[in-house]
Image: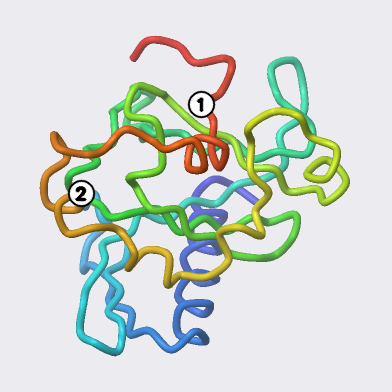
Amino acid sequence: MNVNQKGHLGLVRVVYDLTKQGYEVFLPQHDYSAVDVIVMNTDGVVRRLQVKYRENRTGRNGKAGTIEVPLYSMVNLKRIPINRSLIDGWAIYVAEVDTVIYIPVDVADENANSFNVRIHPRAIESSRSPVAGYTAFLDAASLWKVSEQTRTSPAKRPLLTTVESAILSPSANNTTM
């Protein structure tokens, strides 16, 4: 599959999963928005999500058994940082385990270029590094637990607590944007 096909597959799987969980899902009419889907819960509260398709990382710089989630987009072969004030989180289709995970924007380190999530249960159980297993992010309801202050004022985001910093860690191979 090419990059466009993977992106469309990720979007379809996210829409299906959110609908199955009881949310209303709205799509933009064009492909150049910071937001890929808008999701509304039963109380009418909306969250703006960016959709990602990810596969298991392996290779020279990859950590086997993890997916890397970049905090930038590629446009014409250039890295464009994600404006986190425009989104509330990420919906990530993890191809290897055929599931969608939901990561609130406020748990990712603001200074990182990416973060990792473990996808292999064996690696999750034996891990000593602060990279969480994907099962911690299966419920889209976590996106509605973000405080209103954090969601509306990125400059006032609280520092990560010990528990939150154990959930996600920046990639070891970060480069300056």
Estimate the x, y position of residue 86 in percent, counting from the top left: 18, 49
Disc marking residue 150: 2
Residue 146 appears in the figure: yes
Q: Residue at x 42, y 38 (%)?
A: 161
As drawn, is 37 to the left or to the right of 152?
Answer: right
* On screen, residue 173 above or below 150: above
Residue at point 49%, 35% (across, down): 162
Q: CA distance from mark 1 to mark 2?
A: 20 Å
Element under disc 1: strand
Q: Which mark is residue 170?
A: 1
Q: Where residue 155 sits: x, y (%)?
A: 13, 34
Q: Number of marks in the image? A: 2
Q: Earlier in the sequence, mark 1 or mark 2?
A: 2
- Tell me if residue 50 comes above or below residue 66 in the rendering: below
Q: Crowdedness of circle 2 by 10 Å Cα count: few (<14), some, many (20+)?
A: some
Can you tell which quarter of the image residue 62 is in?
A: top right
Say if 86 sits above or below 41 in the image: above
The image shows residue 158 at horizontal and vertical percentages of: 26, 38
Is 173 displayed left or right of 153 in the figure?
right
Q: Secondary structure at mark 2?
A: helix
Name the amino acid type tagged 2: Thr
- Residue at horizontal 78%, vertical 39%? 65
Q: Which is more toward the observer, 116 or 10? A: 116
Amino acid carrying mark 1 in the image: Pro
Q: Position of residue 12 (x, y in %)?
A: 50, 71
What color scheme is it?
rainbow
User: Given contact means CB atoms under 8 Å apart, are the residues at marks 1 and 2 in contact?
Assistant: no
Q: Residue most toward the front?
A: 162
- The residue lying at 29 percent from left, 28 percent from top is 80
Q: Quadrant of the C terminus?
A: top left
* Residue 83 numbered mark, or none: none
Classify 10 Å Cα crowding around label 1: few (below 14), some (14-19), many (20 and above): many
